[in-house]
Amino acid sequence: MKILITGSTGFVGKHLVKQLKKLKHEIVEINSTNFTSMWNLEKNSIEIIIHLAVKTAAGGYCQNHSGEQWIVNNSINSDMLAYWADNQQRATMVTFGSSCGYSNNIIKTEDNYLKGEVEDGYEVYGNVKRNLLIGLRALAKEFHMNSHYLIPSVFYGPDYDLNDKHFIFDLIRKIKTAKDLGYTVTLWGDGTQERELIYIDDAVELIIACINNPDAPKMFNLSSGKTHTLKEYAQAICDIVGFDSNLIIWDKDQFVGSPSKKLVNTHLKDFKFTKLKEGLTKTIKYYEDCISNGK
């Protein structure tokens, strides 16, 4: 298949491109340096569009750059939907929502995604992702275009940007640094916040399964439905790197977001997700190798 991927140099994008090329698909890679080049492609020449491009970051970015997030991401999504409608109507689009699109005080099943207010601190990013879903549905209604909207938990695994401040990468960096330097380590919150991780290879496998299955759900949580507390994640990392978890200080005055982001696993109950220890071990090894090589 001929597949166009936006955000092809991001964490998910580069893993997905690598695997799709192994499977002999023809890949058109689109990123921030060549976004407009897709308009030069022949009309209706693309079979699948995987739209991953987004401007966001962890570590307070959503709270401190709300205007930028609204302008840039709504522009990216509007341009992408316009391109799809004008040039590649026959293509199926696969794109991501966000767990931030769910309201805090609601059971996080797909039917509840647009219900209630988006969680505090993520109003802009969550609503940008909701708007994308509304756009997909509008194009489906008027032009009968086909799409799949996946709502993921947090992805992790090797070959990530060492500057990425998503909680699991931040935990690995802080705990490993404290171990190497003999320091204590301060982490945000009280450690009871619940989060879910999806190993990157699992995410790629599920995305590819979606594009290969015409009967795949139009919208589904990309989730195992299993969460751990931040204390449990921290302890697992401590066990792998050999750090005493009693040296962790929990700062309860810092912003920690939702107490739980547990997504209900509605459609993936038979999928065998990578075990946490296995995924963390591979991710930590990647980090250690990068540090030892001076990256």
Image (cartoon, rainbow, N blue to C red):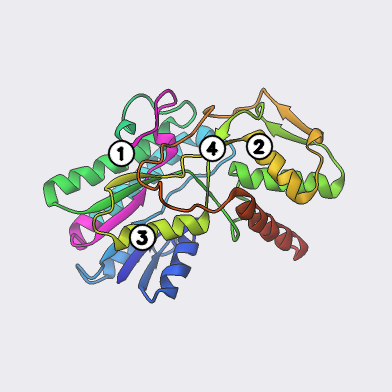
Distance between the alpha carbons at the discs numbered 3 and 1: 25 Å
Give whichever of 22, 75 is nearer the camera.
Answer: 22
State yes or no: discs 3 and 1 in contact (Cβ < 8 Å). no
Instruction: Determine which residue is flagged by label 4.
Output: 227
- Taking the image as shown, residue 269 lies to the left or right of residue 2, namely right
Depth-wise, is mark 4 or mark 1 nearer the camera?
4
**If you read the primary sequence from the N terminus, does the residue marked by circle 3 or circle 2 appear first?**
3
Q: Position of residue 2 (x, y in %)?
A: 30, 71
Where's residue 54, x and y in %?
43, 49
Q: Quadrant of the N terminus?
A: bottom left
**Whole-number angstrom distance, CA of label 4 to CA of label 1:** 27 Å
Residue labelled with disc 1: 131
The C terminus sits in image quarter: bottom right
Q: Mark 4 or mark 1: which comes first in sequence?
A: 1
Earlier sequence position, callout 3 versus callout 4: 3
Residue type marked 4: Thr
Q: Position of residue 36 (x, y in %)?
A: 34, 62
Between discs 3 and 1, the one toward the N terminus: 1
Work out how far the residue at label 3 is from the one at label 4, CA to CA, in angstroms.
Answer: 24 Å
Q: Which residue is mark 2?
A: 232
